[in-house]
């Protein structure tokens, strides 16, 4: 199976990130992160093993349609009073006898139970493959969102460090001016307080980044390395105008999403199980036949001459064939109870399918709403950054010229700092939302 070979390939991948020490910088691409997570995820592996079970079940269902063939070879050494297999009479002698038999049986009709069982097993196998794919898709999406979260926190840390550098330069400048008596000490302390606040922001951003790296490493099931580096994503590659509608996304999900395919196949498999169990109520007609041969050390002709082994094999050769009809009359209601259970399982599978479709439609609607809200927030954040950047530049010029107080400067600086943080958060929040919607359309990696 191609899918199995791919999975084994995943399991054989050696991730150099696992072997790296905490002091080494390890660079991961998104594809590497996804491959590692899929290869190491327990739910993915459980689904894979379940798929192998259903594969064997399917193979057995195919084998049940093939005639059975059995062979029997028996050699007996008898002493004392025994029945001579040649004359069928009692003799008091040592006897060496042999019996050879080859028989075969094939089911001709049993209410089409074997055919429906084969269809059930085939659909169940296909469903398990889709469930395996669903586990891989969910893992992929989780890794993607964790990956984006790390990138988001990296940008937030860079922004916090940039804010700290700006405040640090102002403190250095203000220290010189304070030593010269050009400014009041209160302005210096105001800026030192701002610098301490920015330092706290840097620490918080760094902790958030390390926490997001830990979450990603846990999804990949590799040792945590705080020096992990990720290949960045260019936000410009993502359209800021999502063209698909809720109905478009749902229609694509009906044909592309592994989860929907799986529940539909489970329902079809359950329907075939009902038909198979209904077939158990019908009589079973089978054809059987075979060949047999035997040998006896006491076999002799009319002249009391021993008949040779191969002459006996040639003379005793026989064939037979016949029909068997098995009629279920009373079997402790087993067949009827199995039929009731399979009907109940079909209803459960039908309900699971309807519930899944409803939940997916609701989830698409919710995430689409969140996506549009995130997009509006992002657009507003762009305008906010533009406005507060101009305001801060003007405040900075006035403050450096002594025309504005430190309070005016810090207000303008905090406004632009918050605006930049809001812009980064809004951009990645939008990316999160569109990737979730892409997941429902079978478009995961970019």
Image (spheres, grey):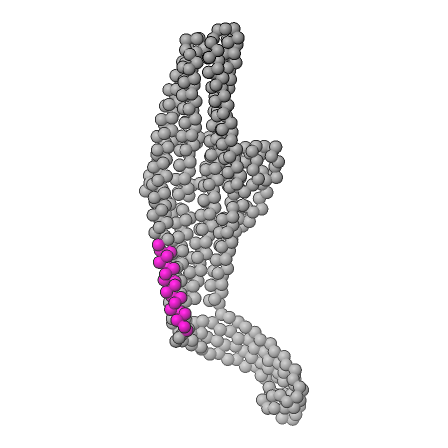
Range shown magenta: 331-351
Residue lying at the far bottom of the rendered structure: 303
Q: Is residue 332 inside the magenta stretch?
A: yes
Identified at 49% across, 48% down, the residue is 43
> Along the horizontal axis of the image, is 247 left or right of 392?
left
The answer to whether residue 217 is above or below residue 400 is below
Asked if residue 13 can be seen in this view, the reply is yes
Identified at 34% across, 37% down, the residue is 369
Tell me the chief SS of the magenta region: helix
Identified at 47% across, 44% down, the residue is 139
The answer to whether residue 212 is above or below residue 125 is above
Estimate the x, y position of residue 192 in percent, counting from the top left.
49, 17
The answer to whether residue 175 is above or below residue 96 is above
Number of callouts = 0
Query: Which quarter shows the C terminus?
Result: top left
Residue placed most toward the observer, 85 or 17? 17
> Along the horizontal axis of the image, is 415 left or right of 18?
left
Residue lying at the far front of the rendered structure: 186
State the image quarter where residue 224 is shown: top right
Q: Is residue 42 inside the magenta stretch?
A: no
Residue placed most toward the observer, 318 or 35? 35
Estimate the x, y position of residue 389 in percent, counting from the top left.
41, 19
> Along the horizontal axis of the image, is 81 left or right of 106?
right
Estimate the x, y position of residue 271 in percent, counting from the top left.
37, 60
Residue placed most toward the observer, 124 or 104? 124
Asked if residue 313 can be seen in this view, the reply is no
Identified at 48% across, 76% down, the residue is 288
Estimate the x, y position of residue 14 in percent, counting from the top left.
59, 42
């Amino acid at each position: 199976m191609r899918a199995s070979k791919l999975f084994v390939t995943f399991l054989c991948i050696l991730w150099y990130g696992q072997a790296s020490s905490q002091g080494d910088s390890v660079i991961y691409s998104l594809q590497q992160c996804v491959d590692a997570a899929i290869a190491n995820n327990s739910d993915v592996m459980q689904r894979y093993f379940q798929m192998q079970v259903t594969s064997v079940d399917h193979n057995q269902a195919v084998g049940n349609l093939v005639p059975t063939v059995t062979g029997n070879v028996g050699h007996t050494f008898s002493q004392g009073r025994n029945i001579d297999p040649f004359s069928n009479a009692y003799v008091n002698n040592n006897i060496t006898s042999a019996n050879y038999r080859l028989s075969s049986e094939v089911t001709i009709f049993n209410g089409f139970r074997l055919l429906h069982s084969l269809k059930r097993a085939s659909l169940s196998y296909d469903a398990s493959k889709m469930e395996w794919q669903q586990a891989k898709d969910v893992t992929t999406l989780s890794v993607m969102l964790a990956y984006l979260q790390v990138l988001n926190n990296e940008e937030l840390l860079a922004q916090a460090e940039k804010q700290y550098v700006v405040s640090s330069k102002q403190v250095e400048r203000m220290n010189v001016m304070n030593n010269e008596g050009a400014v009041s000490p209160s302005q210096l302390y105001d800026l030192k307080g701002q610098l301490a606040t920015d330092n706290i922001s840097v620490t918080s951003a760094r902790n958030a980044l390390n926490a997001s790296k830990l979450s990603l490493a846990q999804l990949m099931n590799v040792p945590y390395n705080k020096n992990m580096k990720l290949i960045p994503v260019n936000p410009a590659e993502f359209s800021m105008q999502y063209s698909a509608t809720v109905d478009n996304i749902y229609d694509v999900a009906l044909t592309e999403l592994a989860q929907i395919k799986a529940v539909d196949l489970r329902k079809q498999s359950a329907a075939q199980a009902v038909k198979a169990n209904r077939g158990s109520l019908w009589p079973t007609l089978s054809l059987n036949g075979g060949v047999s041969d035997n040998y006896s050390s006491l076999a002799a002709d009319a002249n009391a001459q021993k008949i040779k082994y191969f002459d006996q094999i040639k003379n005793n050769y026989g064939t037979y064939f016949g029909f068997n009809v098995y009629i279920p009359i009373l079997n402790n209601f087993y067949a009827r109870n199995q039929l009731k259970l399979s009907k109940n399982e079909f209803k459960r599978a039908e309900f699971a399918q309807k519930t899944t479709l409803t939940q997916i439609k609701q989830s698409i609607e919710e995430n689409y709403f969140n996506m549009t809200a995130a997009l509006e927030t992002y657009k507003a954040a762009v305008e906010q950054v533009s406005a507060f950047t101009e305001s801060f530049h003007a405040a900075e010029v006035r403050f450096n010229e002594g025309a504005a107080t430190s309070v005016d400067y810090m207000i303008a600086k905090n406004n632009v700092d918050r605006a930049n943080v809001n812009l980064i958060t809004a951009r990645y929040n939008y990316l999160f939302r569109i990737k979730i919607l892409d997941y429902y359309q079978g478009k995961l990696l970019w």
